[in-house]
Image (spheres, rainbow, N blue to C red):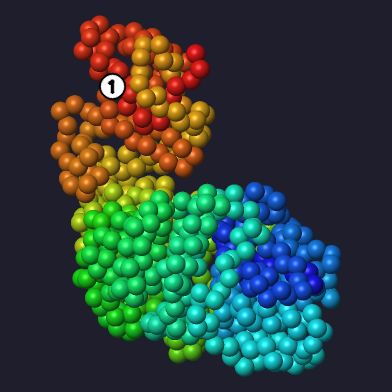
Amino acid sequence: MNVSLSTSLHLDHGTISLDQRPGDQPPMQSFVPIGLLSLKAAVDQANVNARVRVIELNGLVNNQTIKNDDHLHDHIVDTILEADDDFVGLMTDADSLLHTILIAAEVKRRSAKTKVCLGGPASSPISSLLLERFPFIDFVARGEAELTFVELLQQLDLKRKPADVAGLTWRDGSDVVFNKERGVIEDVNDLPIPAFDAYDMSEGAPLYLDVGRGCPFKCRFCATAPFWERRYRMKSTDRIVQEMKLMRDTYNRTHLNFSHDIFTCDQKWTLAFCERLISDKLGMTWTCSTRTDIITPHLLEKMAQAGCVEIYYGIESGSAHTQEVIDKGLDLSWSREIVRSTAAAGIRPVTGFIVGHPTETLQTLKDTIETFFDFLQVGNFRAHLFTLCPFHEAPMFKQFESTISRPAEYAEIAMTQPVLEKFENLKKRHRDVFASTYRFSTPGVPEKLIDASEGLSCHLVVLKSIWPLLLPEYDSALDWYARWTDWIYRRNQQLRPRIRLAHQGNAYDLLDFIDEELIRLGLEDGDVADLARYERIKLDAQQLDPPALPFSSPFALDQNVVLARRCEYLSSNFRHDLKSLLSGERANVLDEESCVIFAKTSTSYVDTLVTQRTTTELLELARRPRTVSQLLARLNSSTAAEDQRGVRLIQQLCERGLLCEVAS
């Protein structure tokens, strides 16, 4: 039996352009498909008579193997389906379920004999509905699917109906059959190690290691806990360390993301795990997710020692009232302290907030917007702002299903018109199936204030230095946000009249808005205006070409070492003390303007260097290779002390990656 398993499409919402045109190549989030590799490993372990292939679509879109043209879904099926395939399994998630259904339809159109099976969180809770609506779908493997998948393939290999396969919804002639539920796997250590050799690990796609499953909490907006039946399970420390060593020693991975919603649910276990990593000295870093009420500053210190570099905290709301309504129940003061302690421990804190609850009011929205900005400043790294997505399996879905009233303003692949028409027609005909592409009604809040939050937070984070100084000029953060919402709508009507995302903007839009607001507030010549100009140039520098030469800082500089400039840069002078401004403090006018270099030192990183005017002279001289002595001579160094200062400056530029040693 020949089996093809494929990931779903995952758009990179943080990097997509609002000015994309139909057919533009979309930025996708490629990843190591752990779930599908786990399915393959389960089949291989059970010695099922099946040859299983695993395809990760997103990387293939990024490298343009799959083209975004009038035949997008045809190209995807070209990649997924081989002539002798008996079975195609498609991963599902809420964001791309529409695409998955179109792919499934094309698979069946080309090969009527091929069985089509869906699995994952978007298809499990509506499995019967999917089979009733779409005759080209044969099966849905519900919930945790390793055992269900193995048994299904075994029955198909024996030409038997899968009537006894627990956890399966399937088509029996004209009937849709919902088999009995399958309980979760009690001991996740029984799962085989995913079949990593079935995927090209050398591509460097992000790796989310399956270290455990399930969440015992009952947040009303969330579908994750019900998917795992609210059963919290962790793999053993020995098993996780075994997989970490495999990643390091076989696939040269030294950084991993631990896939588990609440990694610190059992704090005693987490502490022992960290002690093990500290003892074993694996030389690896990792990230995880958890809640702020099941972690302590002491545990954070141990996690940092064990290699943890980033933690995601789902805060969800800055309103104490909403915390109770959604059954999250966080103490926001303690959450703030944990975010502060995380940063203090040297771990990057990422916080997530949700707006658009059916019970949202202007006050709860105000509380959440203000807490978002506060936690962003306290953590000094990243925060996310999401709109509430209606998930079929979430406890609140049935209660508020009738209020799911309008299409969401979220970014999509810029499909060409023929593909878009099929996409939109399918969405309109089956609105109940694709509920996650719509949003709940919010009678207490204007819809535009909810719509404007879609995709905004990544740009707010890019400009995070500005908000501590600018927002105090407003009655509240919500006051600023409401003004922005109206401003970007007007701008889009003028500059992007056909845009579907009428309340969305990018970082440059935000800076233009800030410039206009500073004039309105009478602050156009002040320190915040200087800071906004700094951030604009830093954004401009992101558009520079990546370094032309590899990084190679010499250990010692003598007069005959030949150096050249290895990257592009921008520079500008500033009237105010940027160090103070970037720390969130007001700044006075400097006695002498400072010079700042903005250098593109890698493909994605812009380094900033506050320096002297001599630096730009030196970088211009180094456009072509010169020895250290030649650079010093051209800088008109006339004394030993000046030579020493020049050498230190050259050394600094080498260490920062602006200059590098080249062959003489």
Give, as a three-letter code, the residue at label 1. Answer: Arg
Residue bearing mark 1:
648
Residue 144 picture quarter: bottom right
Count of numbered tags: 1
Q: Quick check: can you spot residue 37? A: yes
Q: Is residue 3 left or right of residue 330?
A: right
Q: Nearer the viewer, residue 291 or 567?
A: 291
Residue 130 picture quarter: bottom right
User: Could you say where residue 493 lies in the image, as x and y percent from the top left?
Assistant: 49, 57
Question: In terms of secondary structure, where does tag 1 sit?
Answer: helix
Query: Which residue: 28% across, 32% down?
Result: 610
User: Could you say where residue 146 lies in the image, as x and y percent from the top left?
Assistant: 61, 77
Q: Is residue 112 left or right of residue 650?
A: right
Residue 219 vertical position relative to residue 93 in the rendered view, above or below? below
Residue 537 picture quarter: top left
Q: Nearer the viewer, residue 499 or 356?
A: 356
Query: Which residue: 70% across, 54% down?
Result: 66
Query: Which residue: 67% across, 88% down?
Result: 165
Q: Nearer the viewer, residue 139 or 568?
A: 139
Q: Is residue 416 left or right of residue 160?
A: left
